[in-house]
Image (cartoon, grey):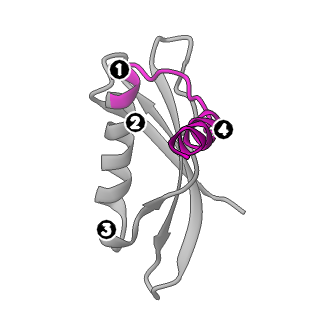
Amino acid sequence: MKRILFIVALALTACGKTAAPVSALDTAARRTCMDTIESRAINRKSVAYLGDPAPVGKNAKGQLDVPVKFSAKNEIGMATSMMAHCTVSPDGKTLVDVAVKESR
């Protein structure tokens, strides 16, 4: 019986997605972007990040492009889904630019 449970547990574990390893630089850039989103939100506690994190890319200047999908409540308390595209310095610590669009 224990062997069957072990096999079932192993099979369930194998069904999970394997994500690409995320570097410390990507994590720092994503945290910089998320901190900016939260600091600019009308209701900071209403910010929720949606889906799996998209991969961080690099532009021609070596800056990091970080896409983040999130939802937040607006002035009247209605949640809206949005997509932020942050441009972060090559070291991942300074926000260069952010563009936010409503997503559907």
Q: Residue furthest right?
A: 104
Q: Whole-percent x and y of residue 5?
A: 55, 45
Q: Quadrant of residue 67?
A: top right
Residue that protrudes farthest toward the front in the picture: 1
- The kind of residue on which mark 1 rests is Leu
Q: Are marks 3 and 1 in contact (CB under 8 Å)?
A: no
Q: Residue at x 37, y 65 (%)?
A: 41
Q: Amino acid at mark 4?
A: Cys
Task: Name the amino acid, label 3.
Answer: Arg
Residues drawn in magenta: 1-27
Q: Is residue 74 above or below residue 16?
A: below
Mark seen at residue 15: 4
Q: Report the mark closest to the observer, 4 or 2.
A: 4
| Badge nearest the viewer, 1 or 4 | 4
Q: Is residue 23 above or below residue 11?
A: above
Neighbours of disc 1 within 10 Å: few (<14), some (14-19), many (20+) = some
Residue 27 x, y percent position in the rendering: 36, 30
Number of callouts in the render? 4
Residue 99 rendering spot, x and y as whole percentages: 53, 46
Residue that mark 3 sits on: 44
Tag 2 residue = 30
39 relative position to 97: left or right: left
